[in-house]
Image (spheres, rainbow, N blue to C red):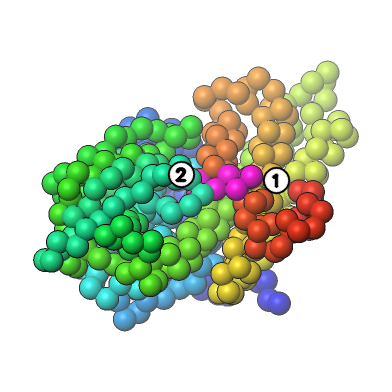
Amino acid sequence: MEFSLTFEQAALKDAVARFVADSHSFEVARSLAASSGFSSDHWNNFADFGWLALRVSENRGGLAASPIEAALIMEEFGRGLVAAPYVSTAVLAARLLDGAGGAQAAVDRLIAGEAVFSVAPLEGTVPAGEVLRARDAGNGYVLSGRVPLCLDGGVATDFILPARLDDTQGWCLFHVPASTAGLGRRTYRSIDQRSIADLQLDSVRIGPEGLLAGSTDASKRLGEAFDEARLALAAEALGLMEAAIDVTAAYLGQRRQFGRPLSSYQVLTHRVADMLVRKDHARSMLYRGLAHLCEIPSVREAAVSAAMVAIIERGEFICSQAIQLHGGIGMTEEHVVGHYYKRLRAIGRTWGDLNWHMDRFMARTGARAQVQPTHEEMVA
């Protein structure tokens, strides 16, 4: 299997790294987090660079890139704590709109950077019993109900929402602009200052073009899109781990104790070595998950959940060790290492936490009928 990047992939990774280095310092990230969360100017740059069009097919005006390209972008975004709603819009919404025949106008707005999307999940985060209902009104649809925990929902111009149509057991997928009459949202921030929204829909009317997927394929398309989005977040987490290790190694080389740099103490360098080993294992599991995205659902879901377990556990170890090796300064708001940790903790609870992914892995691999594996055995 070939693990080296192609020329185009390497050029993309370098371009994103240059953007982060030139335009998104830690001070910029902190300033944006205290206000809107991301920069509209940066978002327009993403559109100009073509980054928003990566996961849209060529016949819809996109670049038809693979999930690997999106993961490369997110890895560098993790290094720079870029809080833009890229996964929600350019991964999740792009994949769902790309497969909907009548959504070209929405696709064009997405590619041009004129829209920010939030997609509500079916599983992994939504509490049991939270179901949006839709009714066929002849010339369109009427939606009513509550939709909690919409990532990037506070800054979204558009929502993609799953709903049960006419009380059937099947799910349908609807595109609802945020300005639609009857749609209300309560916004708040996650632990890492990202925008979340709970939606309340009271007899919201949308036209027939608002139906993106019927009951025959909505669940399948949502499952595929969210698993790809989970791995995009895993790539961001990998970038966070790498940045935390780099910052920690530099600190140990600069900080002196008893007349010697901290990096001269073997016990501390062994900790950094442990962090590097676990980071490399997390990268391997991410690659494995990406390689299985096109497999049948049970294989794909098991691989994605195994990757997420590795990412969550390794990230927790790496970032907590980074804070400990920094000492008290690592706990302050003014130091970057604590922000890496908070972002990684948020990723580990987005669209499924550690227990949810372990349960899904065991369910898809038949492990429930056997002796339950340890965490290490499951991701080996």
Q: Can residue 161 be seen from the camera position used here?
A: yes
Q: Amino acid at mark 1?
A: Arg
Q: Circle 2 — which element?
A: loop
Q: Is residue 351 magenta?
A: yes
Residue 210, compared with residue 371, is above or below; it is below
Q: Which residue is mark 1?
A: 314
Q: Position of residue 16 (x, y in %)?
A: 47, 57
Q: Amino acid at mark 2?
A: Ala
Give, as a single range, the part of the protein colored magenta: 350-356
Q: Position of residue 231 (x, y in %)?
A: 55, 58
Gap between marks 1 and 2 measured at Cα? 29 Å
Quadrant of the rendered image containing residue 92: bottom left
**Crowd class of label 2 (few under 14; some 14 to 19; many from 20; radius 10 Å):** few
Label number found at residue 128: 2
The quadrant the C terminus occupies is bottom right
Q: Circle 1 — which element?
A: helix
Name the residue at 65% across, 20% down.
328
Quadrant of the rendered image containing residue 288: bottom right
Name the residue at 66% across, 51% down.
358
Q: In terms of depth relative to the viewer, which is nearer, 6 or 75?
A: 75
